[in-house]
Amino acid sequence: MHTRTTRSNLFLALLVGGLGVLVLHMSVGLGGHGAGGPIYDGLFDALMFGAAFAVIARAIAIPRQRAAWLAMGLGLLSWSLGELYFDLFVEGSGATGVTPADGFYLAMYPCLYVALALLLGGHLRERRLSMWLDGLIGGLGAATVAAAVVLPPIVAEAHGNAATVAVTLAYPIGDLLLLIFTIGVLGTTGWRPGRVWVLIAASMLLNAIADSTYLYQTATNTYQVGSLAEAMWPAAAVLLAIAAWTPWPPPRRRRVEDWRLVVVPGISLLAALSVFVYGNLHHQLTLGALVLATATVLAVSARLMFTVRENLAMLVRSRRQALTDALTGLGNRRHLMEDLELACRHALPGRPRQLVLYDLNGFKGYNDTFGHPAGDALLERLSDKLSSSVAAHGTAYRMGGDEFCVLLEAATADDELVLGSVAALSERGPGFAISAAHGEVSIPAEGSDPAAVLQLADQRLYARKDRTRDGSAVLQLRDVLLQAFRERYPDLQEHQRGVGSLAIAVGRRMGLDGEELDVLARAAELHDVGKIAIPDAILSKPAPLDEEEWRFMHRHTILGERILMAASALRPVARLVRSSHERFDGGGYPDALSGAEIPLGSRIIFVCDAYDAMTTDRAYSPGVVRAAAIAELRACSGTQFDPEVVEAFIATLAEPRPEPNGAADERFSRR
């Protein structure tokens, strides 16, 4: 492989060097001959045959795109044979009309068309209609200008029998078609063709320019043998040889959102309109130029209409994706909030709506046991069942995680329908049981603000979730611990409730849901349970604690973890409790964790605990007003507290709250 590459590079370098010698000879003359002569003809033909053999050799040596490069090589070979025949039998003989050289020349075109089509089919990975149109527009625009400039004198001077006229016109027509095809190929790549296509396009362009110059000069009797324009022919052949041995880049997705896709149709349309104006002023517009200009305008119009349709479809698709849960196909939270806002705005007492919020029980354990793919499949099944159960009466949504929601026409909704929707979110099998808790709100009877309605439904959901779990041994243990703590420290009962209420609201704002939110709620309630083991003399001391007393006090998070670890189901709660007094800068206790090392739930509890402590009257200090507490939180943001949690907490305080429920809520709203 290495040897073959070295040989090909050496041969290509030889072709490039020969091209340079040819240009030098045409400029200053070598061997006593100027332009033309045996040196000129020999170099010219050697370069043409050398390029043809290089392309054919590539087709033989490398299987990939063999047919395409073989067709390309045969086209070059036919072109080379035409040059050789012309040099040997036509040039200087005075022969006129159609000669066999013309047959060799014209045979090149179909070979090149086939080669380009095969190369395009082998390397184009996206065949979007817009890309085809862009290529067609670019090719038609370029061909329109070429036809308007080159064709008139050629057509005007085309004389002789029918065969002679046909052959004379076949060259410019063949070049125009080749130009359209080549530029069209560039357009189908999204105008990011890569080195191979750039070399091929440059070759075709040079050939078209050389042919057009020759035909134009011949038609206007200005042609001179050996002009530098003639060097474009062997240069085009050499470029094809280099392209044949240039490695193809790996396939990649073509981006079509690019300024070039706007510029090319614009320039092409301007070119077509310019041709129309030029032809109207000078009356020299040929039928070919007229057809090409008209085709360009029609193609640009088609592209415009397709772009509008494509953009509208993209807008619809983008909106659908923005409002749809990718996994289940249900409406997402954004979709729900839009529908809920409309429902709150238009619901009347005589035509109420009902919002039902659901949270799955046991889903986290299912995920941990069977894996996330199985969990995703379960969510898809349950979402289909929920959607079917309420299809005649409302719309189902997935809020995220294992939370679902339905918005019902309350006039037709009843308890049986709600219970049926709850049953739809239940599934049992070997080793697992999935159920759902729910919370309901009637609109507008119980609320007309979307955020307040959703929050009330959430509160009722978790209240029902707690009630349905009262029979579990784990929840009974939690209640026993809370009751024992309250019996010993009754003045901290409101603190527990306040921290728990705040933590749930902040956790939801920061994206926690399902069992993660449940663990946070339990940990917030039990974060001080380790203080059961702290002597009253320390915990209730009115004076500041000394160093030894602080060391003892700092053990309460470890003691709380040990107590909670006794129940395996409370171990996630125990982890949050242990870290609930870690500082964001690493100066907390008991493990001196910092930043993201601290569980998010612990960081939330720490902020909520500090706020509630600051706004509550204690034996050793009076409570402060809410503004002062917020200022203190901001002052300690980034050192003591997580800045993101502080901002989420302050934003939560600013939200409208439902009607107060209990002493903790009263203190929250008052301060």
Image: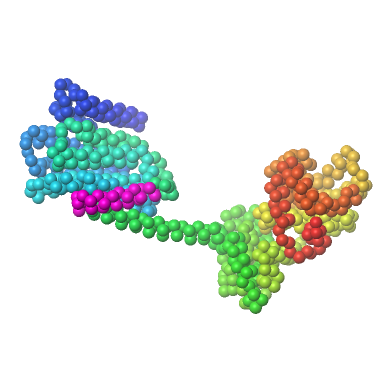
Observer-nearest of 434 and 189: 189
Percent x, y of residue 146: 24, 45
Which residue is pictured at 32% across the width and 35% down the height? 245
Which residue is pictured at 80% across the width and 59% down the height? 670
Q: Is residue 384 above or below residue 376?
A: below
Left or right: residue 340 compared with residue 202: right
Q: Quadrant of the N terminus?
A: top left
Which residue is pictured at 77% across the width and 39% down the height? 587
Magenta residues: mostly which secondary structure? Answer: helix
Q: Is residue 365 visible?
A: no
Q: Is residue 57 magenta?
A: no
Q: Is residue 394 above or below residue 429?
A: below
Q: Is residue 269 magenta?
A: yes
Magenta residues (range): 261-289
Q: Residue furthest top?
A: 31
Q: Is residue 92 above or below residue 621?
A: above
Rendered image quadrant of residue 61:
top left
Percent x, y of residue 113: 25, 46
Rendered image quadrant of residue 350:
bottom right
Observer-nearest of 657 and 487: 657
Rendered image quadrant of residue 383:
bottom right
Which residue is pictured at 54% across the width and 58% down the height? 322
Percent x, y of residue 228: 22, 32
